[in-house]
Image: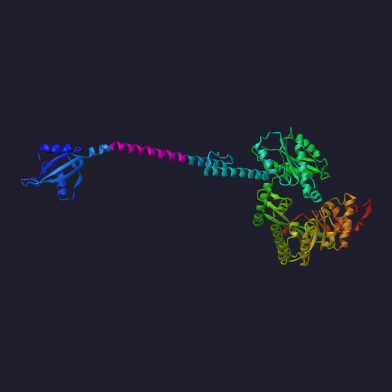
Amino acid sequence: IGGDDIAALQATSALPLQASVLTRATDGRWTREPDSINDFIDKSLAGNAPRAIVDAAGSRGIAVVRPLEAIDGTQSVLLLRYPLSMALSLYRGMFRSLIGIGIAGLMLLITGTWLLARGITQPLTALEAAARNLREGVYEPVAIKTKDELARLAESFNTMINAIREREGKITQLAYHDAETRLPNRAALERRLAAAAQPKRLYLAAIGVDRFSHLRGAIGYAHAAALIRRLGVRLARLVPNAPVARLSSDVLGVAFLADDEADALRRADAIARNLEQPLSIDDHVIDVNVAVGVAQPRSKEEPTAAMIERASVALDQARAAHVKAGFFDEAAYGDPARNLSLMGEMRRALESGDMKLVHQPKYDFRAGAIRSAECLVRWKHPLRGNISPDLFVPMAEETGHIRALTEWVLQRTIEDQRRFSAAGHKLALSVNISGRLLGDADFARAAMDLVRGAAHTICFEVTETAVIDDPKRALENIDLFASNGVKIAIDDYGSGLSSLAYLKQMPAHELKIDKLFIQNLTNGNRDALLVRSTVDLAHGLGLEVTAEGVETPAAFAMLAAIGCDLAQGYLVSRPATVEELIALLSDEKRLRYYRQTAAAGAQAQPVVVDGGFRTHPKLA
């Protein structure tokens, strides 16, 4: 086949074919063709690759091989090739279109996804922001712009916000208002005073209704609450635009302005007078009496609660002074925090030895000797010096430390009694029992366990007022003491609400007349008559009588003349240690003086003069 035949063959094809006739050379290669073409031809002739994409002169294409018969016996083939680039040229536009369509679809997908995500995340972000605001106490509803599931979620969230706002309003109402009267309470007053500027002219009044518990018992709780509510409304009208609150069950508080303390007291007194106008509740006219305590802030930094506390204390001070209005008296109030710290130190004092026990002897007129003594506790603080029992004993009663103190005193009393016995003196010792312990059955049993180890007689001194608080239990424990050999003395007789009923019921052995009657015994007729009648009454009941506060020979002699049994006071001896009292018991000179003074009074045969008594002139 010649070149013309090849050209004619190419021209007859609708495709731009490249035709060539190749002859195998003696070395087995097809003439001037690369190795890839030779391999392709060989495989095609072997039937393994009838058509394939081959490389030819660096180009890729589609090739077909057909064997040719040669006259001279040489092996020839017809190789038809079509370039791949030409074959694919018709599809390039389509490929570009497909790529463009793909890119456009991807962009649409990204845009749609972003819009969808934005439609979801924006409501969720709004919900998150609203939840943060709700946590901070800001009730900001979420705007609803769609009607999908997120819109329903936002609607539920807004409903929850409204419910929380409503409940918080109710809680706030309960927290800052009194449930009975619906008046603002103490917390509301503290909140309002703390939020407002406090000028120097600001004063706070605590207004208390006198005998409120009795009034409430008479008219009932509902009417008592209505009474306080009416007083609060009246107070708000008396002091317009001022914060008014109920501080406690019977106390109202109001802040007001005044020029100075004197002006504040005048205003407080005027408020009290106006509040005391009769009130009509359910067609019942009720008269009320009030007292007012006034206080002022000490500084702008001071908590408002401290001012309210001082006003309440001022109210108590006004009631104690029987005045309508009173200003806070810091000197009279003292330092409660410092005093309270004493209670923690008191237990340490009992262990360290700072607490001491002293004994004040009682002179027995009939025996002409000292046969008993009262045990008294004394505290010498390492920093504050001597602390009065009138301070720490009542505080011990209020704070619950009185039992530990009394048991310590009782233990030391029994120990000291053994020391007196060892020195040859059989003394009956008395211990004061607080009213807070008189009804305590556990203390009563513990006290009896201690008393069983006493060497001689132990006497418990109790007051009638101690029995009044819980008569049943108190009298039961007093009976227990008496049945176990403990003598009972009625202390401070005449100083309180002395009751003949309790005097009759108590299994007492001794009656102690309060020193208020003894100190004026020789100065007035009335005290002398009261002392003599008390002595006669006690003797009629089978009781010994002790006169407390005996400080003068005249009173000592008059008591002997009246028939008193025992005398206790500074004339006999001040409270003494065990060693000092043992020395006194051995002082015959001093005991002789007591006997002579008592004998002179007894021989004076006192007679009534102008309703009083006259004793020996030397003793008067």
Assign the magenta stretch its main secondary structure.
helix
The outermost residue toward the left is 72
Q: Look at the image and say whether residue 97 sits in the magenta stretch.
A: yes
353 or 157: nearer the eye? 157
443 or 454: nearer the eye? 443
Residue 71 lies, with reference to residue 364, above or below; the image says above
Q: Residue at x 82, y 40 (%)?
A: 277
Image quadrant assignment for residue 572:
bottom right
Q: Look at the image and say whether residue 339 sits in the magenta stretch.
A: no
Residue 119 lies, with reference to residue 520, above or below; the image says above
The outermost residue toward the top is 259
Image quadrant assignment for residue 537:
bottom right
Image quadrant assignment for residue 86:
top left
292 or 398: nearer the eye? 292
Residue 186 picture location, percent across and down: 69, 43
The outermost residue toward the front is 12
- The stretch in magenta equals 91-118
Q: How is the image coloured?
A: rainbow
Count of numbered circles in the view: 0
Residue 534 in view? yes
Residue 251 picture location, percent across and down: 75, 44
Residue 599 in view? no
Tell me the quarter of the image containing the N terminus.
top left
Residue 389 picture location, percent across and down: 73, 52
Residue 78 picture location, percent across and down: 13, 43
